[in-house]
Image (spheres, rainbow, N blue to C red):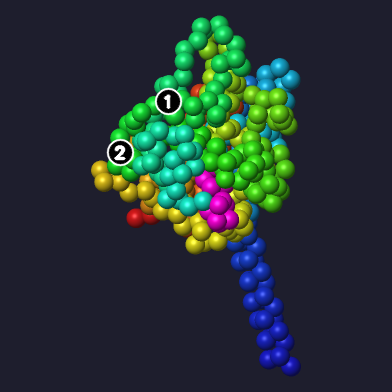
């Protein structure tokens, strides 16, 4: 009896020790999680006051939302606090959706990546015979910048009167007779190329760009509040307005002459919807692994390494930068337009996504997102 009782006591002690260790480990994990959340919170609280334009921040780890918070206000007049449903102009973060639309049309058999501009737009001049859809997608087309071709206007002209739209961009490019370089010979970031891709989506699908994206991307993924904005045709719910800080304070700077184009930067979205977009990319909801590979294959040009004007790496696929960060595989993009700074950073092997959306021009969304990412990324030798 004594030995049996002794064994029971020993087993009970073992169970208690295991339970204590499990509880202690859970507390450590919780403490680490709380510490990360506190550090993220402090990054943004130190930059953004309660009543000024701000930012929305999302962190997804291993498929779970571990941080989601808004800072500041969506507009200065009504002082609406920014939250997970606040819709920001994505600017060039739009390009990944335009790229996906083109890939969906390739999936449908409506186009091929080697189709040429003159195959799609017969009125395009001779130089269009050398430019393929693939060149447009990976920024190696050599197209002239439509921003440099736009007419000038008096400084006091209302911006809505001088905003260029996609069809007008096509007209500007049709009236040119050359490119910056032989298509495929160099890499040069091109908003012109992505405007044309938006028009290609329209022509090859038979639907307006905004409708195709709704039907094939936003609706299937339940991104209910995301849209391609066209003034007079739809409205942005819970809209954040862009701002710039001057010496005399904050000014609403929400629109510019180039804010009405679509394929290069016309989408509005929120943290709530972008979390769904991130999940669809992770789970390959819209396209298979094989179909996604062209988007995740960096362009190679005869000149060698691909770099941005500031000298930083610019490995680029279809609507995504692909250069790693501190040894971590990554697909990412940033957006910059008047009054907005945005970014999505997806660390593939780490199963980590950080999204930062700002409705003010003085913050570097990519830099802030990488500060957040550093709290989660394991060090690489």
Q: Identify the residue at image location x=71%, y=29%.
A: 233
Relative placement, left or right, of 134 versus 251 is left
SS under mark 2? loop
User: In this picture, is 18 found above or below 362?
Assistant: below
Q: Do the residues labelled 2 and 1 touch (CB within 8 Å)?
A: no
The local crowd at label 2, few if under 14, some if 14 to 19, many if 20 or more residues have their Cα within 10 Å, is some
The residue most toward the bottom is 1
Report the span colored magenta: 95-110
- The residue lying at 71 percent from left, 84 percent from top is 8
Please state, as top left, top right, bottom left or bottom right, where the C terminus lies in the image: bottom left
Residue depicted at 61% across the width and 66% down the height: 21
Q: Is residue 226 toward the left or the right of residue 288 in the image?
A: right
Q: Which of 323 and 370 is in front in this view?
A: 323
Queried whether the magenta region covers residue 96, the answer comes back as yes
Residues 257 and 176: in front is 176
Position in image of residue 258 (x %, y %): 53, 24
Q: What SS does tag 1 mark?
A: loop
Horizontally, residue 354 falls left or right of residue 273, namely left
Q: In terms of image quadrants, where is residue 214?
A: top right
Q: x%, y% of residue 267?
A: 61, 35
Q: Can residue 15 be seen in this view?
A: yes
Q: Indicate the quadrant where residue 43 lies.
A: top right
The label on residue 182 is: 2
Q: Where in the figure is residue 144, as x and y percent of width and height?
A: 39, 29
* Residue 377 seen in this snapshot: no
Choose top left, top right, bottom left or bottom right for residue 16.
bottom right
What residue is shown with label 1? 175
Q: Which mark is residue 99?
A: none
In the picture as drawn, the residue positioned furthest to the left comes out as 303
Name the dominant secondary structure of the magenta segment: helix
């Amino acid at each position: 009896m004594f030995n049996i009782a002794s064994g029971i006591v020993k087993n009970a002690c073992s169970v208690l020790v295991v339970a204590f260790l499990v509880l202690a480990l859970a507390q450590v994990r919780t403490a680490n999680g709380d510490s990360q959340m506190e550090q993220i919170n402090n990054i943004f609280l130190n930059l953004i006051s309660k009543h000024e334009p701000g930012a929305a921040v999302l962190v997804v780890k291993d498929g779970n939302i571990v941080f989601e918070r808004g800072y500041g206000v969506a507009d200065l007049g009504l002082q609406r606090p920014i939250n997970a449903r606040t819709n920001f102009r994505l600017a060039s973060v739009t390009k990944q959706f335009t790229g996906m639309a083109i890939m969906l049309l390739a999936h449908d058999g409506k186009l091929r990546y080697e189709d040429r501009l003159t195959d799609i737009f017969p009125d395009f001049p001779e130089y269009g015979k050398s430019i393929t859809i693939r060149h447009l997608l990976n920024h190696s087309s050599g197209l002239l910048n439509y921003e440099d071709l736009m007419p000038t206007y008096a400084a006091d002209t209302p911006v809505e009167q001088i905003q260029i739209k996609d069809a007008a961009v096509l007209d500007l490019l049709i009236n040119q007779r050359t490119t910056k370089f032989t298509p495929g010979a160099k890499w040069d970031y091109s908003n012109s190329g992505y405007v044309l891709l938006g028009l290609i989506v329209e022509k090859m699908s038979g639907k307006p760009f905004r409708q195709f994206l709704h039907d094939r991307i936003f609706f299937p993924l339940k991104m209910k509040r995301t849209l391609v904005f066209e003034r007079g045709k739809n409205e942005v719910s819970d809209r954040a307005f862009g701002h710039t800080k001057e010496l005399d304070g904050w000014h609403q700077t929400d629109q510019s002459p180039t804010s009405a184009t679509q394929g290069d930067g016309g989408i509005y979205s929120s943290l709530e919807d972008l979390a769904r977009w991130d999940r669809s990319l992770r789970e390959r909801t819209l396209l298979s692994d094989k179909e996604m590979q062209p988007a995740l294959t960096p362009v190679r040009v005869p000149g060698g390494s691909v770099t941005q004007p500031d000298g930083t790496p610019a490995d680029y696929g279809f609507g995504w930068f692909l250069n790693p960060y501190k040894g971590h595989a990554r697909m990412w993009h940033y957006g910059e337009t008047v009054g907005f700074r945005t970014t999505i950073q997806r660390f593939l092997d780490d199963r980590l996504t950080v999204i930062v959306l700002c409705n003010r021009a003085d913050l570097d969304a990519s830099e802030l997102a990488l500060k957040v990412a550093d709290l989660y990324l394991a060090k690489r030798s």
